[in-house]
Amino acid sequence: MSEQPFTPYNPAEIETRWQTQWESDGLYQSNIDYNKPKYYALTMLPYPSGDLHIGHWYAMSPSDARARYKRMNGYNVLFPIGFDAFGLPAENAAIRRNIHPKEWTYANIANMRRQLRSMGAMFDWRREAVSSDPEYYRWTQWFFSQFYKAGLAYRKLSPVDWCPTCNTTLAREQVWGDDRHCERCGTPVIKKNLSQWFFRTTKYAEELLSYETIDWPDRVRTLQTNWIGNRSEGASVNFQTEHGDVIEVFTTRPDTLWGATFMVLAPEHPLVPKITTDDRKAEVVAYQEQATRLSDLQREAADKEKTGTFTGGYAINPVNGKRIPIWIADYVMMSYGTGAIMAVPAHDERDFAFALKFGLPIQPVIDRTDGLTRTYILKNSVKVGFEQALAKMGVAYQTNDSAWIASIPVEKVDEYIRLAQNFIQPGYWNEVVGSQWVFIFHDQTIEWDSVETAEIILSRCQQLEPTVRKFHTLMEMLWSNEYYREALYHSNYGTMINSGEFSGTPGDRAKKVVIEWLEQKAIGQGAVNYRLRDWLISRQRYWGAPIPMIYCPKCGIVPVPDEQLPVLLPDDIEWRPTGESPLKLHPTWRFTTCPKCGEKAERETDTMDTFMCSSWYHLRYLSPQYDQGPFDPKEYDYWMPVDTYTGGIEHANMHLIYTRFFHKACRDIGITKGLEPMIQLRNQGMVLGEDSEKMSKSRGNVVSPDDLVKAYGADVVRAYLMFFARWELGGPWSSTGIDGVMRWMRRVWAAILEPGIQGNPEANLIKAFRRRVHQTLRNITRDFETFEFNTIVSGLMELLNELAKAKTSGLYGSPAWTEAVSIYIRMLAPVAPHIAEELWARLGYPYSVHTQEWPRVDESATVQEEITLVLQVNGKVRDRLVVPADISHDEARKAALENPIVQRFLEGREARQVIYVPGKLVNVVG
RNA sequence: GGGGCGGUGGCGGAACAGGCAGACGCAGCAGACUUAAAAUCUGCCGAGGGAGACCUCUUGUGGGUUCAAGUCCCACCCGCCCUACCA
């Protein structure tokens, strides 16, 4: 034990001292060690916005604690850090303060490095990577070239938001308000078409939908699945205008081509000016202008009244040669598919509404009366559970207003009724047989082609069954039933009609044969579409990695040869907005020679989306100085894939899809291995201000980690962040809550360093004490595995209360005490690394606590010889008995029945049933 | 409109496989120490009833399953987040 006199807990002194010590000892350097299992723990890299936010601490310090825990469990752990340093905020700050984006960024990085170090995390700083360093973006550019060479990068005209006053393209977050104005000058933005670079993320859509090999939260998987969207299978078909221009459309229903009675283009579709006739010009232009002003949100509001205008132009329907008018309408999006649709009002809800409003022809081409099963509305027989029985067999469900619907193929009705018996309690069957069924559809011929159909159905229902009161209820029933929804709009069952030679083709084959025919006639081909769009890489910005491409008048697009990378970002630049990509205005930078022919050529002047930089930073961490490739293959083979990735849920749809795409694309090129870059993902929530609002400077509710560290020390801040909320949920900050953690830390300090009262503890006391220690160890170990950080800290607090008691009960100084303290400090080490190291050293244990083995649970110590048996009467707790843990069923039963309180509550009744849950309770039912 | 997440004391949150609801902490109250305050320590602390041992109620609401439900099933209400005419 220590000879040192007791001094109060002084985090400031301890923390700086140990941080210096660890640094100079290289305690957190991670090197390849083939004798140990590896563990790559990755936390999302910060953007160097200036100050480390409490949110960064919230994300990183529990991640750090878990990395430390893994290390103590024998893993060779890599826990690196870096900066996502390119991006728009640097340019904005630069414009506001007239300071170079580079200067601003690197000053921020320096400050944030200092702040990150104050956290006392086990970052291996030798592996730090900064995405705006030329040594880094050299390889970002290299990846771009590889993607280009592999056919994954292409150029396409694409609209950007443009401010006509500032003369500049705007990022999404720079467009404000419902009227979509420029954040700087307030001018309403317009759309402008620019030739830009895209990656073919859609090529990987199918694979990105599979999560079989990774352990990611359901929430993220759902978000990504919705974002990527389900596959729509169909065909792309070429229509021609009367002037011979080709308009390509995508359709999931090629079998309805004969019902295409008009076309609709997105207002910004490039062919619109050409198609529009002189007499329609004024209206078309007016409509276009109005459409560009609407936010996507307004424009895409599903319940919005359909608007649009006729262009005056006509196209030819390639399947029947009919002349059909071309309209423009904002319900067609330039950003999905081809920005043009064939409108089939008879079989598409939106087209139908549009046709009705503008008096366009409607031509049914699918007969949907065949193939339907009978649907029954079941009358209430709730107490019998007949509906539930059918539901269990998967043929019935309940509507929102409690009606039961069963949908059963005609020939199987009798069979299902018979089968239902198995699910119904004996004795009730006769009631079922006697209950009434009412059918809606029974060999009725019904037109399924339009909303009018619903009215027909309703009127028939009312004739048949007056208890069906609400029209919308019926429609809901039909719509919420997959089968009928399918029948209404996406049926494969309907037979083709009014479709020339295809009339009479049964629905199940219609799509296939029409696609074959289209391909044969070279009118179109089978195609698959996803909601996911290709990734737009180009940014008309300065502070990013230049796209390494050269435009040669003779040779066309030529990638910068790998050995000439990086294409350096020049420092002497006008970064203020001028209307062009800043690099375009540099006097010399853009002019170069063609790598192929040596003639004069020009560089691409756009830079890359910063998501490109952050898609592969986990690879650069492996070997940030390596100059033969983006990473050292030796390091890659040892460390990859990332075992645990932690960060905010807000990246579910962008970064986390891009990085998966990136990995898969690289795998196909031969750069990376394996299906996925990150095996396990966990997300933390958000720390809100004390007012439960999002922290923001304008609200004045920001909590500064620097101030907290000064007031409480890093260990307390770390522990409080782990303790105050469930990690994945987050919650509001509490300035009094952290005081409680400070108190705990001081008590830890005092409990371990201040002398106690030695004595001769009884064996039972020692046993109980050791049981608590090892039970806590088991719980905390489990909680580290499952990211339940709040109960790790509360478990430590509880055990400290035991330690405090032990100091006066005679346990102090015993072997059990020494063991407990040693285990306690090691459990504390990942949470509060500085105080743990200090206590460990003061007790004379060998440096460092962080390289110690995680303590092992002594299973024999956790065994309880006596348990508290809960006695219940009819499920209510009435008494508790301390009994031997191995009490037999009969003994427990006897003890319960003889218990006077139990007898009192039985009130003289016989015990009808006695339930015994071993080790827990006895429930007497009487 | 679609999808997701959540709803437990005054507050943040515990409850590991359906088995003692409210661990741990904050705030509050009372006491000890102190000339006093702070700090520290001890005790109390879901609601109602009772002098009391105790009793009743209680996990958003209403049903259901079960010997037993915060936990499982059904319906509904509220809050937050994401998404949105996907052809």
Image: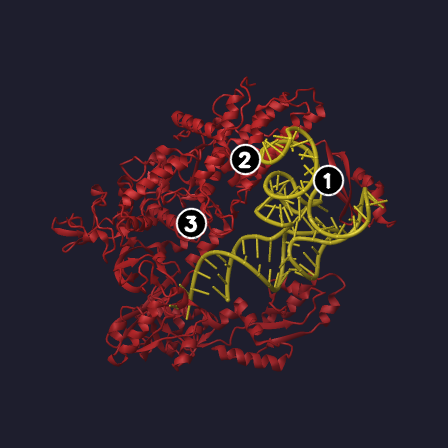
Marks 3/1: CA–CA distance? 57 Å
Q: Amino acid at mark 1?
A: Pro
Chain letter of mark 1 equals: A
Q: Position of residue A449 (x, y in %)?
A: 47, 77
Q: In the rendered image of this protein, does residue A677 appear above or below residue A516?
A: above
Badge 2 and badge 3 both on one subunit? yes
Using the rendered view, name the quadrant where residue B75 is placed: bottom right
- Residue at screen point 23% across, 57% down: A580
Q: Name the secondary structure under disc 1.
A: loop
Q: How is the image coloured?
A: by chain
Marks 1/2: CA–CA distance? 41 Å
- Residue at screen point 48% across, 36% down: A711
Q: In the rendered image of this protein, does residue A409 appear above or below residue A546?
A: below
Q: Amino acid at mark 2?
A: Met
Q: Name the secondary structure under disc 3.
A: loop
Q: Position of residue A798 (x, y in %)?
A: 62, 35
Letter of the chain in red: A
State the mark number for residue A697.
3
Letter of the chain in yellow: B
State the mark number for residue A717.
none
Which residue is tagged 1? Answer: A918
State the mark number for residue A742.
2
Mark 3, other Cα within 10 Å: few <14 / some 14–19 / many ≥20: few
Whichever of callouts 1 and 2 sits on the residue coming sooner in the sequence is 2
